[in-house]
Image (spheres, grey):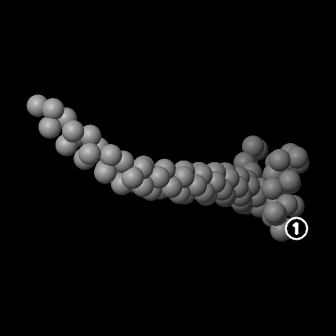
Amino acid sequence: MLLPKQAELTQGSQTSPPMLDKDARPGVLSLKEHTNRILAAIHNKKVALEQKIETVAQDVCLLRADHRTLGAKVEEAKCAMTDMAPLVNDHAARIQQMQ
């Protein structure tokens, strides 16, 4: 959200024609207008960075959720393997007896 002064500066540079100093050469921007344009550019870059940061934060949340889900699935698989171990050992013993 823009502060009132920032809004005035960014809106001024986007809507009003360039202000020229009386003593300046034709087509040369005044210091105030030049400053307003720089401030507007800085503000636009700040907004873009904030959006990127928000996107990265959302991606991190999704990755954490995926990590928890995968961790739960790994634990499930470990339990299943532990439960299956006696059956596998018993089956292996039977096969060995047959040979």
Write down the quadrant of residue 75 in the picture.
bottom left
Which residue is painted at 54% across and 52% down in the image?
A: 69
Q: Is residue 92 above or below residue 12?
A: above
Which residue is painted at 42% across and 50% down in the image?
A: 80
As helix, strand or loop, the secondary structure at mark 1 comes to helix
Q: Nearer the viewer, residue 57 or 41?
A: 57
Pointer 1: what residue?
4
From the top left corner, tell me how far across and down residue 85 is, in percent.
31, 50
- Compared across the picture, whether 5 is left or right of 66 comes to right
Hey, what amino acid is under mark 1?
Pro
Q: Nearer the viewer, residue 14 or 28?
A: 14
Q: Quadrant of the N terminus?
A: bottom right
Which residue is painted at 76% across and 58% down in the image?
A: 36
Write down the quadrant of residue 43 in the picture.
bottom right
From the top left corner, tell me how far across and down residue 98 is, in percent.
15, 32
**Residue 59 visible, this angle:** yes
Which residue is painted at 87% across and 61% down in the image?
A: 8
Q: Is residue 60 above or below residue 4?
A: above
Write down the quadrant of residue 99 in the picture.
top left
- Compared across the picture, whether 14 is left or right of 60 comes to right
